[in-house]
Amino acid sequence: MVGERNGGKTTLVAQLYEQFLRGPFAQMLFTQSWSLQGFERKSFQSRAEFGAAHPDTPRTSAQDGLGFFHIAVSDESNLERTDLLISERAGEVYREVRDRPERATALVELRKAGVVALILDGDRVAKPRMRAGVFASVRNIARALLDSGGLHPQATIQLVTTKVDLFTGEGAAATLEALTEFEANLGALLNNRFELTTFRIAARDPSGNVAAGSGMDELLRSWIAPPSSAYLEEPVLPKLVSEFDLFLTRGRNE
Ligand SMILES: Nc1nc2c(ncn2[C@@H]2O[C@H](COP(=O)(O)OP(=O)(O)OP(=O)(O)O)[C@@H](O)[C@H]2O)c(=O)[nH]1
Ligand SMILES: [Mg+2]
């Protein structure tokens, strides 16, 4: 999860856990988690027992460093298990990457990630005066990640627009139009290097008008799907003749 402060990164992950507390989600069954306490810590402020007027999510602090949530899920149809490790970091750290791309190489989760989800704060997209700023932020982070060369070559990049429950009222049509244009522009920026898929979600609408976890089923399924096969083709080996060539196969056969 990559994005600036307040974008909705932690809420997305916490809501994923909440969905599984209710039962199967996205045709997946909850199977195991090594970070139940972590999920609970991120979720308690959204519960009625907490007594607040609106659900909230505790801020992720830069001092927390890098954290991971673990969740294992199984496909309802064939019970095939997938373990997901979802990284969590404070938004301000990613802001630094935006301003100083060389910092990206120090962020180990970016080098390892199979999926990099760039979080676009829908709240700011919905506000005409903040829109250009939030688009620039995500574009610059994406560019910094590309320029740093620190991404795994097989990684998939996603643009996840959060809080789409806020796309209401008379400005909604213009908001959606601007978002569609931005999605296309970002796709063009990554063109040829990484494929971009886009998602629009409302993890947790505080007004309750939009169902919790909206759009997240599709997002979760995309994390389960096998990575694109384009990079996985076995290279054609030349004929192996010498003893040295045989070192290539020796380790594999044993
Ligand atoms: N309307 C609406 N608000 C949301 C939604 N998801 C999250 N929020 C709110 O957005 C704010 C920020 O959410 P966080 O999940 O803490 O954001 P973050 O990206 O983890 O931010 P940092 O930890 O500071 O990096 C919180 O007040 C959430 O309640 C949503 O789907 N709809
Ligand atoms: Mg957070």
Image: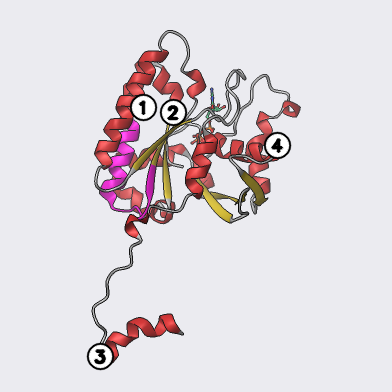
Tags 1 and 3 in contact by the CB under 8 Å rule?
Answer: no
Q: Residue at x 25, y 37 (%)?
A: 188
Marks 4 and 1 sit apart, C-alpha to C-alpha, by 33 Å
Q: Earlier in the sequence, mark 1 or mark 3?
A: 1
Q: Secondary structure at mark 2?
A: loop
Q: Are marks 1 and 2 in contact (CB under 8 Å)?
A: yes
Q: Which residue is mark 4?
A: 22
Residue 139 falls within the magenta-colored stretch: yes
Residue 242 is labelled as 3
At horizontal 46% and vertical 85% (from top left) the residue drawn is: 254
Q: Report the residue marked by disc 1.
A: 134
Q: Which residue is mark 2?
A: 121
The Cα–Cα distance between marks 4 and 2, rounded to whole angstroms, is 26 Å
| Residue at the extreme top of the image, as rendered | 170
**Badge 2 residue CB within 8 Å of ligand 1:** yes
Q: Amino acid at mark 2?
A: Asp
Let me know if residue 231 is in the magenta part.
Answer: no
Q: Residues under labels 4 and 3: Cα distance?
A: 60 Å
Q: Residues within 10 Å of mark 3 (few under 14, many from 20)?
A: few
Residue 248 placement (x, y as % from top left): 33, 81
Circles 4 and 3 in contact, beta carbons < 8 Å = no
